Image (cartoon, coloured by chain):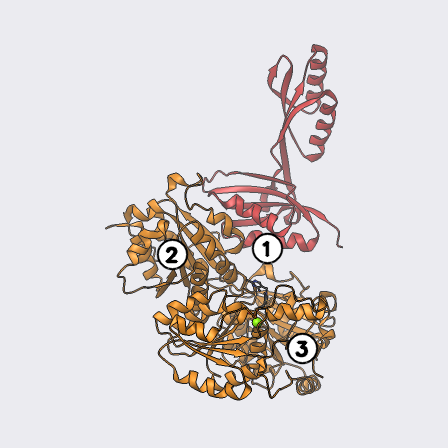
Chain colours: A red, B orange
Amino acid sequence: MNPEERHIFSVLVENRFGVLARVAGLFSGRGFNIDSLNVAETHDESISHITLVTHGDAQIIDQIYQHLNRLIDVIEVTDLSTAGTHVERELVLIKVATDDPQKRTEILQVAEVFRGRVIDMKPASLVLEITGDEGKLKAAIDIFNTYGILELARTGKIAMLRGSEK
Amino acid sequence: MELSGAQILVDGLKREGVEYIFGVNGGAAMPIFDALYGETEIKLIPMRHEQGASHAADGYARATGKVGVALATSGPGATNLVTGIATAYMDSIPMVAITGQVFTHYIGSDAFQECDVIGVTRPICKHSYLIKSSDEIADVVAEAFHIAKTGKPGPVIIDIAKDAQNNEALFQYPETVDIRSYKPQVHGEPAQIDKAAALIKEAKRPMIYAGGGVVLANASEELRQLTLNTQIPITVTLMGLGAFPETHPLAMEMPGMHGSCCANYAFTDSDLIIAVGARFDDRVTGDLSKFAPNAKKIHIDIDASCIGKNVPVDVPIVGDAKNVLTELNKQVRTADIDPWRDQIQEWKQKYPFEYEQKSDIVMPQFVIEKIYEHYSDAIVVADVGQHQMWAAQYFKFTEPRQWLNSGGLGTMGFSLPAALGAQLGCPDKTVVNINGDGSYIMTIQELVPAVTMKLPLKIFIINNMYLGMVRQWQELFHGKRYSAVDYHDNPDFALLAQAFGATGLRVEHPEDVEPALQKAKGITDGPVVIDFIVDEEENVFPMVPAGAGLGDVIRGLS
Ligand SMILES: Cc1ncc(C[n+]2csc(CCOP(=O)(O)OP(=O)(O)O)c2C)c(N)n1
Ligand SMILES: [Mg+2]
């Protein structure tokens, strides 16, 4: 077996219903993995941007690239992991239990360390927004876990090539 | 002028040059069928099952190179089309399948005869459209035909809600189609073509391995030039038969599981494989770890995802076979490969396709040889099983689109409706259907429209009273445990043909084969069915057992 690698694909697609199903179906039908997936409209409302994180050996990654390209609604596919240096970010919303005030102060201090923002606060819980790369988010989640996470939602990774590389 | 959506659809189909639509009527498609009523430019062929409609559209497309069109209602009509769509998809056949859909306000409510056709067919079509509004129809039809026939061809589905068929809109048919996200690469990279030429110049044991892509790209002429200019031996796959004449001394016949020993040994010894429009299918390569261990590979294909999928490739060339071969032909030269050609000739002579003739019983291979004697120029449409392999082995194809079969999906029941479509597409050709007793009865109902239209189809059943190909595997690999393959309880196909209004003949003795074929030749005002009762337990050889290497071919007789 060849070594498995993680790749981030940036995929521009027509902004139509059914397109996501085609992309997802390609993965499920061929047994490829999706580690994370983010889809949203771009500044051009006729185009959506998909950021897709996957893993596999070189042959599988090549097949994923080729098959994405083969879909009629796919305008452009870039393998960010090979196309050049890129930036990536992910946003997480964490709802943490704050049953006693002492705990709440501590949590707010920890949030500060991760440059987290409080976007909602209730007597027994608060919601934090934290942005970062994978390592930072993992570290944050690990810490807040010790205080008791009630709910968590992540956007999945979004990414693009740096500066003039496009 | 405002027209109903159904009328816009029909007018669009006319713009695309559609001659025939194969369909079965039903509630959600009634406005379309209504618009086709009395229509003279497009002939509507009422089939007896939607599977027959999709195979007929497919057979029409394979025989003519044009886009075949099938039409069905929603729900069960659409699901019945599915096998034919998948068959066309696996063999990259240009087809447009149109299905009626329930009213838009019912979509998603599990309405009567509602089925998510787009969802069901997503993995078996090149593209699909759900139309909810009449004003989308003209553009979608133009796009669908463009997508079906360009690049790597394939089936495209248009699912139209009933209100979109009924409502009126302006008919404005696009003059050109430009899809920003769909630009097939048709020209090969010149640098890659140079590299290929350089490899060919150095090879001592080169071979050409051509597939159905050559037929699809209408590149047989260019393939012949390449072969004749270089005098490199060639093997053509089951899907490509006829792309190069099998009667030519350089032809090694088909490779693979039931291919010629010569082609399989050649793969094993070759030092350069020039693959054109072929996809290194497992039925061709056998065990990949033993496949062509000494050969460099050049792979020409329109579909980049096909290259390097099964076998690592040294020189990939993405492009249309016709364009790439034209460029390659301008510069290609070979080294001295006389010893290699001599070796090929020796294998060819030593290991021809052969069988043991019997005096008291009809041998299936003998029937095919006799069919070839009488119908060497015909379009031959085979079904799936042993008879398909014998037809591929013993009929010598010389022209592209002369041999039609479901190679990729291996769909039993394909051949009779496909032969019907082929005959309509090529009225001046004789169409011979070589069928199996198991396959024939899967779509036998399509004899009805063939009789109605008086199509002079020659339907030859190689009747071994078994699902023969499966029985062969049971004999060889399951200790002769013949589970669910005994078809001795089938009806008398000659009598049944007569009940359908066709001519039906039954042949049980070797000496009756010739007179029956003579008789069939004289019948031109409708289909003739000859039920050839053949040796029940004859097997197809040579055979490369599943999972074995090509060098381990079981030769059979010798
Ligand atoms: C729709 C479908 N069902 C099952 C099979 C599996 N299968 C492959 S060949 C074969 C036997 C075909 O029997 P027949 O048409 O009599 O041809 P023969 O092999 O006897 O020549 C079967 C069942 C298939 N290919 N297609
Ligand atoms: Mg049989």
Horizontal and vertical percent for residue B292? Answer: 71, 71
Residue with the mark numbered 1: A66
Q: How crowded is mark 3: few (under 14 residues within 10 Å), some or many (20 or more)?
A: many
Residue B152 seen in render? no
Q: How crowded is mark 2: few (under 14 residues within 10 Å), some or many (20 or more)?
A: many
- Establish if B190 lies above or below A72: below
Dot 2 amino acid type:
Ala
Dot 1 amino acid type:
Gln
Residue with the mark numbered 2: B142
Under tag 2, what secondary structure?
A: helix
* Gap in angstroms between the C-alphas marked 1 and 2: 26 Å
Query: Residues at badges 1 and 2 in contact (C-beta under 8 Å)?
Result: no
Q: Which quadrant contains ligand 1?
A: bottom right
In the rendered image, the residue lying farthest to the top is A101
Under tag 3, what secondary structure?
A: loop
Q: Is A19 left, or right, of B146 in this rendering?
A: right
Mark toward the viewer: 2 or 3? 3
Taking the spot 63% from the left edge, 71% from the top edge, the residue there is B196
Label ID, residue B542 = 3
* Gap in angstroms between the C-alphas marked 1 and 3: 36 Å
Mark before the other along the chain sequence, 2 or 3 = 2
Question: Callout 1: residue from which chain?
Answer: A
- Establish if B168 lies above or below B512: above
- Establish if B353 lies above or below B133: below
Q: Nearer the viewer, residue B214 or B81?
A: B81
Is disc 3 on the same chain as disc 1? no
Q: Nearer the viewer, residue B4 or B268?
A: B4
Q: Is B536 left, or right, of B414 in this rendering?
A: right
Taking the spot 54% from the left edge, 72% from the top edge, the residue there is B436
